[in-house]
Image (cartoon, grey):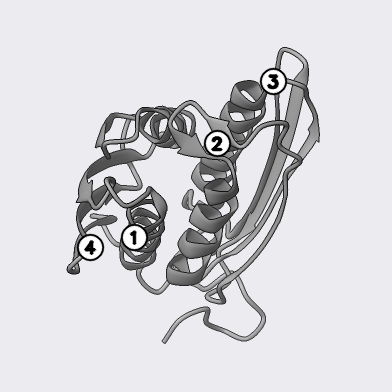
């Protein structure tokens, strides 16, 4: 297991500028500024409940809409997680979490498999959660899974309030990512796969 499981990623296009830093062995510190208040709040949940230090500084064409900013944050965060995981030797690899928040209940399962795939099943009540278009939550998770080379299943099992649903979902994401990326001492430097490796 590498002593430093950190990564810094910059993604710049004509539409967005995104800078992301992650430390998988952090204390859950979040420094997130995206220009979308609800998105800042949700990403801070991932850091806090996954005990992953996350820094995200993003500017985008929010005057157009939120799509490009949310998508590129998901891509950059996913890439940073992928780089911090390295060859993924000696990690737990798979984990899940189910998190309640008042009437809402959310479940997330992840497999740090080296293959990007996402299944997102979230019934939103409204079109927006604060400043964040509700449909972009799924797009963010797809982008993160794709660039993070991880399998992600995310579901809201119960709930009425969209803020509660989203917050429970991202808390569950944090807990699942934190648990799956944790070192497993019994593995040493071996990959958690019968194939002998997860990434080249």
What SS does tag 2 mark? helix
Say whether disc 2 or disc 4 marks the residue closer to the N-terminus.
Answer: 4
Q: Position of residue 56 (x, y in %)?
A: 24, 44
Q: Which residue is mark 1?
A: 72
Q: Which residue is mark 3?
A: 161
Q: Residue at x 47, y 60 (%)?
A: 144
Q: Residue at x 58, y 41 (%)?
A: 134
Q: Which residue is mark 2?
A: 170
| Front-lying residue, 121 or 193 | 121
CA gap, disc 2 and disc 1: 18 Å
CA gap, disc 4 and disc 3: 32 Å
Q: Quadrant of residue 103?
A: top right
What SS does tag 3 mark? loop
CA gap, disc 3 and disc 1: 27 Å
Q: Position of residue 59 (x, y in %)?
A: 19, 47
Where the C terminus falls, by quadrant? bottom left
Say whether disc 2 or disc 3 marks the residue closer to the N-terminus.
Answer: 3
Say whether disc 3 or disc 1 marks the residue closer to the N-terminus.
Answer: 1
Above/below status of 176 relative to 163: below
CA gap, disc 1 and disc 4: 9 Å
Q: Which residue is mark 4?
A: 15
Mark 2 or 3: the one toward you: 3
Decide if residue 89 is in sight here: no
Mark 1 or 4: the one toward you: 4
| Front-lying residue, 152 or 63 | 63
Above/below status of 194 relative to 182: below
Mark 2 or 1: the one toward you: 1
Does the residue at mark 1 contact the one at mark 4 (Cβ under 8 Å)? yes
CA gap, disc 2 and disc 3: 15 Å
Q: Is residue 89 left or right of residue 84?
A: right
Say whether disc 2 or disc 1 marks the residue closer to the N-terminus.
Answer: 1
Q: Quadrant of residue 148?
A: bottom left
């Amino acid at each position: 297991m590498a002593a430093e499981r950190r990564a810094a990623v910059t993604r710049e296009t004509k539409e967005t500028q995104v800078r992301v830093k992650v430390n998988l062995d952090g204390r859950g510190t979040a420094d997130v500024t995206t220009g979308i208040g609800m998105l800042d709040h949700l990403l801070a949940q991932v850091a806090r409940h996954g005990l992953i230090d996350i820094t995200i500084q993003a500017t985008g064409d929010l005057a157009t809409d939120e799509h490009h900013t949310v998508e590129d944050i998901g891509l950059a965060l996913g890439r940073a997680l992928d780089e911090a995981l390295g060859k993924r030797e000696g990690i737990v690899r798979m984990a899940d979490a189910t998190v309640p928040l008042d009437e809402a209940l959310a479940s997330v399962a992840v497999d740090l498999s080296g293959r990007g795939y996402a299944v997102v099943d979230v019934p939103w009540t409204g079109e927006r959660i604060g400043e964040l278009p509700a449909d972009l939550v799924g797009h963010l998770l797809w982008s993160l899974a794709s660039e993070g080379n991880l399998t992600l299943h995310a579901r809201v099992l119960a709930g009425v309030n969209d803020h509660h649903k989203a917050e429970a979902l991202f808390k569950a994401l944090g807990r699942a990512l934190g648990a799956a990326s944790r070192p497993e001492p019994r593995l040493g430097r071996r990959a958690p796969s019968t194939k002998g490796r997860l990434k080249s």
